[in-house]
Image (tube, helix red, strand yellow):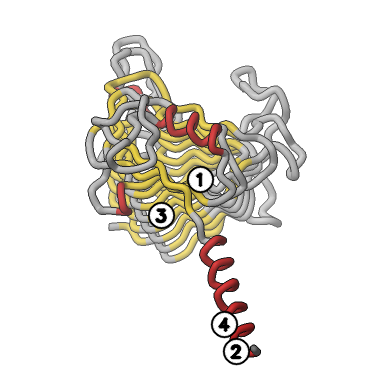
Amino acid sequence: MRLFTAITSACLLMLASNDSAAVTKIYMSAAGSDANNGASTSTPVKSLQRVQSLLVTLDPDDDVEVHIAPGTYLGQTVYWNYLNGHTITFTSQAFGSTRPVFDGQGASSTWFTLASALGLETNLKFRYIQVQNYLTAIYFSGNREETDLSLGWNGHNDLYGMMIRRIGGKYTTSSTDYSTAAVRLVNSRNNTISNSHFVYIENAAPAANETDFRGSIHAVYMAHRSSNNLIQTSQFVNVSGDPIRVRDSSDYNQIESNVFTNSGAYAYSEWYCDISRTDCTSPVYECPSFGNLVRNNQLAGSYDGGGLGTFVLSGSLPNSCPRVRTSGNATL
């Protein structure tokens, strides 16, 4: 009797363990159809919009994996607001090394916008996906104007093994377009970007008598209380603006063990907008950022072909609380 009870308890424990590890899977293919249910590789959907509508209907109480088959997905954009408190992972099918390609075909748009300002972990993960020919690749959009640090944010998102290339005004069909970011964070915190590639992140050279926006685009732009983010072991190549930019109380971010090649004038730049300025777009006062760390990066030349500086700061403030700390950065 005791043996039966022990075995039964062990089985129940195993079932509970298996249940807690349950995953809802949805399959995508460039040759799929949004009339499908996405439940298997034989019934894949075609768009991220359809994936979101399926999840809204299913509303699974477990982790989600969106398996994306290799291929080219043309002109897709998604405004993502489905969250279930669990991890939602967008990945190359079966976590393979062949990246699916989302190609914006020169659209003046953003491939993936996370719209969440609820002050909750959003837990989106992106794995081995290529995004190209958009004005902006990814936008984690919290509330820009919320100054209460407990409100208005999103976070705990993760980009790994991503290829983000040909992003910015230079690669859109409109000659007047310009972008400020390949990946933009606004009031978004505790995110990780690692083992990824940012290549050809550029605004176009201006025509005569036009404003030069080439320096306005950044590979990763962390703004308006986007703090405690980690950017590591990634490659930045041919970025016309400073590849990493922080703005307005974006504190304690770590930029480490990256390689910056032919990118910007400085690997890292910090800026904030004083409301007294006539060109300030912020309706509230902005503040400098503090405690950011730039270390063990390799600096291999600026966008104009000269030497690449490590960092530059906006304005001048007492250094009682360091705005940036650097160590181990090497000029190549």
Q: Residues within 10 Å of mark 4 (few under 14, many from 20)?
A: few
Tell me residue 159's x, y (percent): 43, 48
Looking at the picture, which amino acid does disc 2 mark? Answer: Leu
Identify the amino acid type marked 3: Ser
Q: Which residue is mark 2?
A: 3
* Residue under the point 72% across and 30% down: 285
Q: For this rendering, which residue is in front, 94 or 199?
A: 94
Which disc is residue 7 wearing? 4
Q: CA distance from mark 1 to mark 2?
A: 44 Å
- Gap between marks 2 and 4, in whole Å? 6 Å
Q: Position of residue 166 (x, y in %)?
A: 28, 32
Q: Residue flagged by tag 1: what amino acid is it?
A: Leu
| For residue 283, above or below residue 58 | above
Cα separation, mark 3 vs mark 2, equals 49 Å
Query: Which residue is the site of mark 1?
Result: 124
In the picture of the structure, the residue carrying the numbered disc 3 is: 194
Name which of mark 3 and mark 4 comes first in the sequence: 4
Residue 253, percent from left and from top: 56, 53
Camera-near label (1 vs 2) is 2
| Quadrant in the picture for residue 145 | top right
Asked whether the beta carbons under mark 2 and mark 4 sit within 8 Å of each other, the answer is yes
Q: Is residue 101 visible?
A: yes
Image check: 238 left or right of 218?
A: left
